[in-house]
Image (cartoon, rainbow, N blue to C red):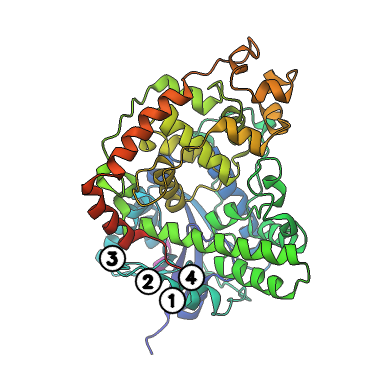
Amino acid sequence: MSPKNTLTIWWIKRDIRLLDNLCLHKALQDSKYVLPVFIWEENIFSHQQYSRFHFEAINTALKDLQKNLKTLNSNLLILRGETLQVFNQLKSQYNFQAIYSHEEIGSDITYQRDIQVQKWCQQNQIKYKEFPQLSVIRGLKDRDKLDQSWKKRIQNSQVIQSPNSVPLPKNFKPIFDNSFKTTKPTFEDPSQTIIQSTSETSAHNILNSFLKDRSKRYRGSISSPNTALKYGSRLSTQLAYGTMSMRYIYQQTEQKRKTTKDPWQKKGLQAFKSRLHWHDHFIQRLEMEPQMEFYALNPLFEDLPYTNKPENLQAWLKGQTGVPLVDASMRCLRHTGFINFRMRSMVTSYACHALHLDWRYIMYPLAQLFTDYEPGIHISQLQMQAGVVGINTIRVYNPYKQAIDQDPRCIFIKKWVPELQGKSPAEILSVETIPLLNSDYPKPIVDFKAQTKIMKDALYKRKKSTENAILKYQVLHKHGSRKF
């Protein structure tokens, strides 16, 4: 057995929790002392994909983690600076022997950062270990093995209990630097925002309320923006920052599904379990194809008739397109950092197919608006809704039809587009009268039918081509879903 490390850095990234944290568990097993460290990395958080939504979520989670650590007579360091500079500073101050972190499946900037940290550790004779917290497999070649990983890591293995202690080095001096959040612009008046709390404590409250009651209406409620806010799980933000583990959520869900006598709740929890599987499926795509942040999974769909007009991007981001449900969804996002999955698909489809905005052109601006921004899911969904994967049905969401189906009384629309308060649902839902609704509300900035026809024609031409028959098979083999 190898000797224990005297001191290990627990490098906290998107695993801001004590319960079921394999990285922390291994650090405690292998070390005499463990120093919890979070870095506001200036080379990462200055990137255009991040916004105040993310800073506030992380800061709330860190404060909760610090509170929980203090109950164990422990603490953490919150530092700010360039990643390697911070580790050099910590090395001179604490002389640690190892850095343990979880496997982060992030965008290219964090991917490159991790490579640099690994090289730095090799140069400085520091042990660097990463531990999985999802079923996603590093270096996976055969996607069929993902099901085995899910069963081994998520379904059948035991949840790791919170530690009884996290012993700090004797020369520890606490620093809590949360100043980095002030360097990003605010989208809206902070007094008007309603941002979901993100922390290990709030994660347990949210999961408990979902399993106790809200899941009973899960299946019939997650498509409408009016009901999804309450009856959806609302755990996506907690998963994004690792304030609760996938394993714990899945096993608690399965336990409730087996014991509930309510048939609707049983069906709802089964549907929710399927979505947990999809979570890891999409993140595995980014792990296997890190360049998908920059290129379509199917190269045949690289050259599409995008115009990328800046004025269309700004109208879309600000909820000024003249399409009520699109505008309501984007304004809701700007204030809350959240809309339900169907509305996310719709606004992306509208941007790409009607406004002819390249999915890469909207990728970072949209990422800024999602408090639950998860790169693997975000990039995968952008490509899917833009129709550039080539293996899925091309879906062009009609926002007028979606309004009729999902918000027939225009409750959501009127809440977020107050210019339409005095109008009847019939007026708002009629495509013909929208241009005449109100002088304070913009007319549609594009002809939806004409513009989507141009993009659909381009997509179908490529999808039906002989060349795509080969490329489609390659993409499907590497990235297609497998039955769990």
First-in-chain label (4 vs 1): 1
Q: Which residue is mark 3?
A: 124
What whole-number distance in Å separates the C-alpha atoms at marks 3 and 1? Answer: 36 Å
Mark 2: which amino acid?
Asp
Q: Which mark is residue 472?
A: none
Marker count (numbered): 4
Nearest to the eye among marks 3 and 1: give it.
1
Q: Which residue is mark 4?
A: 484
Q: Which class describes the residues within 10 Å of circle 4: few (<14), some (14-19), or many (20+)?
A: few
Does the residue at mark 1 contact the one at mark 2 (Cβ under 8 Å)?
yes
Q: CA distance from mark 4 to mark 3?
A: 43 Å
> Gap between marks 4 and 1, in whole Å?
9 Å
Pick the residue in front: 421 or 131.
421
Residue with the most extreme top position: 439
Q: Which of pointers 4 and 3 indicates the residue nearer the eye?
A: 4
* Three-letter amino acid code at the position of disc 1: Gln
Q: Which residue is mark 1?
A: 148
Q: Residue 239's image quarter?
A: bottom right
Q: Is residue 406 above or below residue 484?
A: above
Q: Horizontally, is 25 left or right of 231 in the view? A: left
> Which secondary structure lies at badge 4?
loop
The part of the chain drawn in magenta is: 93-99
Which of marks 1 and 3 precedes in the sequence? 3
* Residue at the image position 73 percent from the left and 63 percent from the top: 265
Quote the CA–CA distance across marks 1 and 2: 8 Å
- Cα gap from disc 2 to disc 3, whole angstroms: 38 Å
* Whether residue 182 is visible: yes
Q: Earlier in the sequence, mark 4 or mark 3?
A: 3
Judging by the rendered image, the residue that carries numbered circle 2 is 144
Q: Nearer the viewer, residue 255 or 67?
A: 255
